Amino acid sequence: NSENLSILTKIVSNFETIHPDLDITKKLLERIELLKKTSIGSTINNITMPDQFGQIIGLDAIKAKYTLIDFWASWCPPCRTESNLLNNLYKSYKTNGFEIYGVSLDEDRVKWSEAIMEDMLEWPNVTDFAGVDNAAAKAYGVYYLPQSVLINSNGIIVVKNMSDDDLELYLAENLD
């Protein structure tokens, strides 16, 4: 994660000095760059994908004080459990400026659409049906599910992977 980014950058820099031509060096440098682009305080990259109706929805079209980018999948039990809490938070804070933008790592259109309906997800949900190779997940360094990124109205990452209780507290403190 990006909590120790300065230390990781120094370690990778030292490693690169000793092993400049190794494949692992290139991968480590790429990972450091990804962490820099997705750390708290960074400006997010736009996501543009189709929703379950085939309509293209860009993250930049969401205008809210805070938007939670929720990375999930229909086949992920913890994701499905978390959707209950997100439903409650959405109902409580939507009128105060809270929005959710769901990005699914599903490959199966039917299972994805069924999960949206079963879990009563009212916010925009998008996917490219690439599974774990989802373009947005790769751009945001998503390696496990569920993961989330909370951005402010300027597209700045303010929190990443906050616990359910902490997210609720954060919203209560910042949107009430």
Image (cartoon, helix red, strand yellow):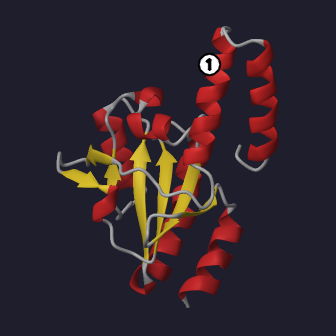
Could you say which is closer to the camera, residue 25 or residue 46?
A: 25
Could you say which is closer to the camera, residue 44 or residue 95?
A: 44
Q: Say left or right for 100 vs 25.
A: left
Residue linked to disc 1: 26
Q: Position of residue 108 (x, y in %)?
A: 34, 30
Q: Say left or right for 118 vs 8.
A: left
- Up/down of 161 relative to 50, above or below: below
- Up/down of 155 relative to 161, above or below: below
Residue farthest front in this picture = 17
Residue at screen point 44% across, 86% down: 96
Give the position of the N terminus as an image quadrant: top right
**Can you see residue 146?**
no
* Quarter of the image where one finds residue 82: bottom right
Q: Position of residue 74 (x, y in %)?
A: 45, 41
Q: Position of residue 133 (x, y in %)?
A: 44, 27
Give the position of the C terminus as an image quadrant: bottom right
Q: Position of residue 42 (x, y in %)?
A: 55, 57
Residue at screen point 68% across, 78% down: 169
Dot 1 falls on a residue whose secondary structure is helix
Residue at screen point 49% across, 54% down: 70
Could you say which is closer to the camera, residue 28 or residue 136?
A: 28
Residue at screen point 43% across, 64% down: 100
Could you say which is closer to the camera, residue 101 or residue 5?
A: 5
* Quarter of the image where one finds residue 136: top left
Q: Say left or right for 176 vs 2.
A: left
- Disc 1 residue type (three-letter): Lys
